[in-house]
Image (tube, rainbow, N blue to C red):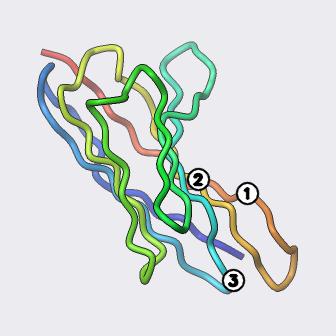
Amino acid sequence: QVHLVESGGGLVQPGGSLSLSCAASGNYYRVYNMAWYRQPPGKQCELIAEISRDFNTNYAPSVKGRFTISRDAAKDAVTLQMNGLKPEDTAVYYCNAMAHTFVSGTSEHWGQGTQVTVSS
């Protein structure tokens, strides 16, 4: 079982910054890709940033240049640094990881979500 624990959400003014963190724990063999998704109010969940074990990154066009994903491979942790926040970035943000466990093989795992609200 893989547990993903997120932290760092909150309320910020437009143009401000926030950093989200997520760490994996539990009984698993290896964590592969890690990513951040978000679900704005009334909209579908969308992938916004992902990072591989060898630190290759990919961003959604809506956040490229403003958000930075990074990874601590030794701790199986991922951080999303969000700068230049806009009201349309308001959403619940979810940490996601592909991991191999001894029980169920390679599968997708999700954090509980953390609210980010951008408002003046």
Where does label 2 land, which residue? 96
Where does label 1 land, which residue? 108
Q: Which mark is residue 87?
A: none
Q: Quadrant of residue 11?
A: top left
Q: Position of residue 77 (x, y in %)?
A: 43, 69
Q: Are marks 1 and 2 in contact (CB under 8 Å)?
A: yes
- In primary-sequence order, the first of circles 3 and 2 is 3
Residue at disc 2, secondary structure: strand
Q: Position of residue 86 (x, y in %)?
A: 25, 18
- In primary-sequence order, the first of circles 3 and 1 is 3
Where does label 3 land, which residue? 28
Amino acid bearing label 1: Glu
| Quadrant housing the N terminus | bottom right
Q: Position of residue 114 (x, y in %)?
A: 41, 44
Tell me which residue sits at (87%, 74%) in the image: 104
Mark 3 to mark 1 CA distance (whole Å):
12 Å
Circle 1 residues within 10 Å: few <14, some 14–19, many ≥20: some
Amino acid bearing label 2: Asn
For the image shown, how many numbered marks are present on the structure? 3
Mark 3 to mark 2 CA distance (whole Å):
15 Å
Residue 115 or residue 48, whichever sits in front: 48
